[in-house]
Image (cartoon, helix red, strand yellow):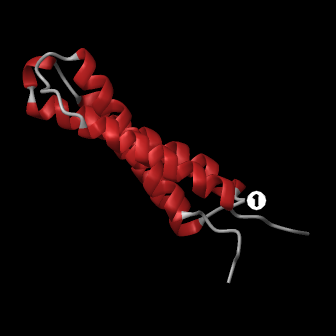
Amino acid sequence: MNQNRISLKWLAYTFLIGLSVNACFSILTISIVPFSIFPFLTLYFAVNHFYSIYIKETHNELSIRPAWAAFFIGIFSYAAVVGALHPELGSNIISITLTLLLSIWLMYKLMFGDKHYSA
């Protein structure tokens, strides 16, 4: 088996961090979205646990770009959900398109990975 694999824990936690960051931002800036303490708690615990995983798993360079993609998928998917729930806020076609493009790229990376050819 290939030991240099993309960490699924990194992807799950960065997706959760992206969701909760956008939820916290939406709660604080959009008056239609009701206030809740749970996105702030989720953000705190997800960042705390992700940091502990980051410290324990060294030499995991293959997971950095997919983790950023999962983070932005979380941000844009929450924006798409808020736009779908409250159509008076405007169109959400950009967030849906970016979510789909990043998801396709991430699935490609998970299925095929990086191709390293040696001579």
On the image, which quarter does residue 109 sit in? bottom right
Q: Is residue 100 visible?
A: yes
Q: Position of residue 25 (x, y in %)?
A: 32, 24
Q: Position of residue 8 (x, y in %)?
A: 51, 64
Q: In the image, what residue occupies the spot 19% across and 33% down?
A: 36
Q: In the image, what residue occupies the spot 31% across and 29% down?
A: 24
Q: In the image, what residue occupies the spot 20% across and 17% down?
A: 30
The quadrant of the picture occupied by the C terminus is bottom right
The image shows residue 6, relative to residue 19, as above or below, that is below
Q: Give the amino acid at mark 1.
A: His
Q: Position of residue 10 (x, y in %)?
A: 53, 56
Q: Considering depth in this image, is 108 or 49 the residue closer to the camera?
A: 49
The residue at which mark 1 appears reads as: 59
Q: Position of residue 46 (x, y in %)?
A: 43, 48
Please identify the residue farthest to the right as the structure is shown. Answer: 119
For numbered disc 1, what is the local secondary structure? loop
Q: In the image, what residue occupies the spot 35% across and 45% down?
A: 100
Q: Considering depth in this image, is 81 or 34 the residue closer to the camera?
A: 34
The image shows residue 113, relative to residue 88, as above or below, that is below
Q: Dot 1 surroundings within 10 Å: few (below 14), some, or many (20 or more)?
A: few
The image shows residue 94, relative to residue 101, as above or below, that is above
Q: Is residue 105 visible?
A: no
> For the image shown, how many numbered marks are present on the structure?
1
The quadrant of the picture occupied by the N terminus is bottom right
Q: Is residue 9 left or right of residue 89?
A: right
